[in-house]
Image: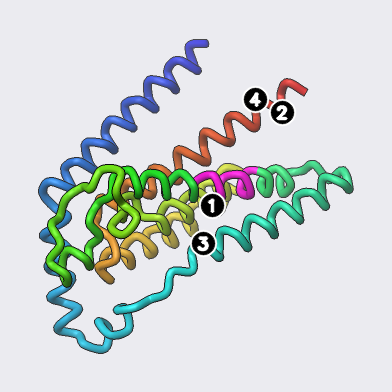
Amino acid sequence: MEKRDSSGYLGIIISLLVFLVIFGSIQYLDAGIAVKVMRFLQFVRPLHKATENIPDILPHLVVIGTILMWAIYFYRWHKKKIDVKTKFLLLAATALPAVYLFKTFLQFSFGRTSTRLWLTAGKPLIFHWFNGFETGSFPSGHMTVFTAFGTAVLLYYPQHLRLVLILLAILGVSLIITDYHFLSDVIAGAYLGFITTYSLSYLLDKRRNKH
């Protein structure tokens, strides 16, 4: 009981620290970083052109990845192969669509002006509460989904910690230096992806232990 309580308190403290970092980034860092990045991109014209209209394939990746993982999971479950790989597939296949829907709802709810709309179209940098169909960029969808998947990998294959962290760091930096997201969007997406997968893992383990 004491271990569970201490873990709960630690989770609350970490969440509060993350929220403070996000708030601080929104207030003091986001705009300045985005402007500097845009000036850099305008100076390096080929890079600016290459990152101008990158298609969003995230929904397709989530759908295809989810279908494939569920198919493999049910095949292994049918063959009675209930091992680490099967448990990983169940968690990842559950987390990806769940976190995608969650981030979509949050993007609509916060309705934050996206980096490029603010920089190129002169839109005000504000939160359009519950009106984010065109402007919602908080949290970052890519950071949310890939962190959720990365967390599932780490929970069952912790030996890949360094690789997962490096890849997620590259993704986060890429989203910022191409001016597709503010720093706080990336931080919020990473935290959302982590906490969603971690919570689902806890619920799935709890359900497993009852049977």
- Spatial separation of the CA atoms under disc 2 and disc 1: 21 Å
Q: Which residue type carries mark 4?
A: Lys
Q: Residue at x 31, y 55 (%)?
A: 137
Which residue carries the number 1 mark? 149
Packing grade of label 4 (10 A; few <14, some 14-19, many >=20) is few
Q: Nearer the viewer, mark 3 or mark 4?
A: 3
- Lower position in the chain sequence, tag 3 or tag 4: 3
- Spatial separation of the CA atoms under disc 3 and disc 4: 30 Å
Q: Which residue type carries mark 3?
A: Pro
The quarter of the picture where residue 105 lies is: top left
Proximity of marks 3 and 1: CB atoms separated by less than 8 Å: no
> What span is in magenta?
91-99
Which residue carries the number 2 mark? 208
Which residue carries the number 3 mark? 59
Which residue carries the number 4 mark? 206
**Residue 145 placed where, x, y %?**
48, 53
Describe the element under mark 1 as helix, strand or loop: helix
